Image (tube, grey):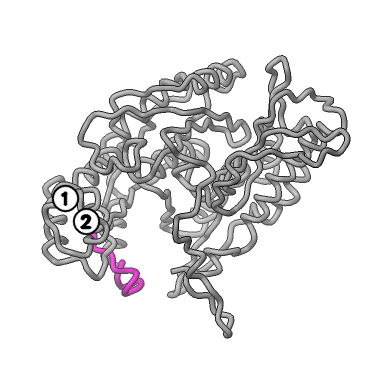
Amino acid sequence: MEDINLHFTGDIHAITAANNLLSSMIDNHIYFGNELGFDKVVWKRCLDLNDRQLREVETGLSNEKNIVSRRDKFDITVASEVMAIVCLAKDMNDLKRRLGNILIGYNKEGEAIYAKQLKVQGAMAVLLKDAIKPNLVQTLEHTPAIVHGGPFANIAHGCNSIIATKMALKLGDYVITEAGFGADLGAEKFLDIKCREAKIKPDAVVLVATIKAIKYHGGQQKENLAEENIDALEKGIDNLYRHIDNLKNKFGLNVIVALNKFNQDTENEINYLENKLNEKGIQLSLVEGWAKGGEGAVDIANKLVDLVEKKEEFKYIYELDESIKSKVQRVATNIYGAKDVEYSEEAEKEIEKIEKLGYGNLPICIAKTQYSFSDDAKNLECKDEYTINVRNVELKAGAGFIVVLAGKIMTMPGLPKVPAAESIDINEKGEIVGIF
């Protein structure tokens, strides 16, 4: 587990290096005369660390001749467009094509400048030649699992790579893949972006839930979540119902709820949840894989085998030929349950620019808090009407989608007051402790 959660095979380091190679090539081009006429650079550097100090920086302050200082920004590596490209590329040629299509800046006439004009896509692909290959690992019970890519669904498209998914589909009778950070984020992007790009569709959706999370959305305080509270469960279950409704009725998919069991979950709470879901015609499976391994997941495996045989009518939330605003409106109102969408002046200008460049037909990737259907992380119950506030919009021409930044979401997170790093260590046996 520690290896997978740390450096693993070095994929993220390769993505970081490829991203920052492009940055260095941009500034080097400007240093040697700026033949392409950069007036505005939009490409950001990246780092695989939470570091809020890097959200906005000043570069080129050495006062050397010809060095042009400029404001720059950092993303965390999982939000890098290079990460998205690795996950959406179909093969090495497609990877190079997408890297070349990265929009990196504009000249004084407002014309777009792309990475391929710096002839850098080949060198970037060389750095990614191993990172593009899926990683085969195994569970403690020797079940094969393919781990590849890590774009977080609150700030990116949140799915593993198309290459990994298609490889798994070739190798296995049943394939389960993850779309993280909630069904409003991960699942929507998996279905509207990845499935569309890869020309695949799921036969069923496993919606993972916990008693603790449902009670938290029902108003129970974090420090008391271990205590039985049917009232909080009753209030919080509306959040679960909304996710189910999105998947079943908006996307037209078969759904089963996997209840990830914790030791403190009571029989009353489990029975209450199962009865409520039965009333809605939704199956629940109590999953105890963490405690019992495969034996604790036999029930959901059997139910899934039956569920995937049921017919479904999968549909996207929007069509690509709709305007950018129309696509955002459809996701915000149909999936998030918002009454409307409001745009900043900067976002309005960027949308106009993107559509003028001819990219208005790309899918959208909304970056939003994972804690709420709204763009307010503290609005857990979403009882009252709310609006989605679009702060900015960014074109990811290489990845092939448009990032829509909503609310206060940051693509370079900060550390908490007590960082996990304080508890992580390695002992004299070389064993890593404190990650879990």
Residue at the location (12% across, 60% down)?
A: 271
Q: Are marks 2 and 1 in contact (CB under 8 Å)?
A: yes
Magenta-highlighted residues: 285-297
Q: Is residue 414 above or below residue 343?
A: below
**In whole angstroms, how far apart are the C-alphas of marks 2 and 1?**
7 Å
Residue 89 visible in the current orientation? no
Q: Is residue 352 above or below residue 56?
A: above
The x, y position of residue 13, in whole percent, is 65, 56
Residue wearing tag 1? 277
Residue at the location (60% across, 39% down)?
A: 56
Taking the magenta stretch, the answer to whether it contains residue 170 is no
Q: Residue lying at the far bottom in this picture: please name it.
A: 429
Residue at the location (41% across, 44% down)?
A: 186
Which element carries disc 2, helix, strand or loop?
A: strand
| Dominant secondary structure of the residues highlighted in magenta in the image | helix
Judged left or right of residue 408, residue 283 is: left
Which element carries disc 1, helix, strand or loop?
A: helix
Judged left or right of residue 299, residue 280 is: left
Q: Is residue 185 above or below residue 17?
A: above
Judged left or right of residue 327, residue 384 is: left
- Amino acid carrying label 2: it is Leu
- Amino acid carrying label 1: it is Leu
The x, y position of residue 312, in whole percent, is 30, 40
Residue wearing tag 2? 284
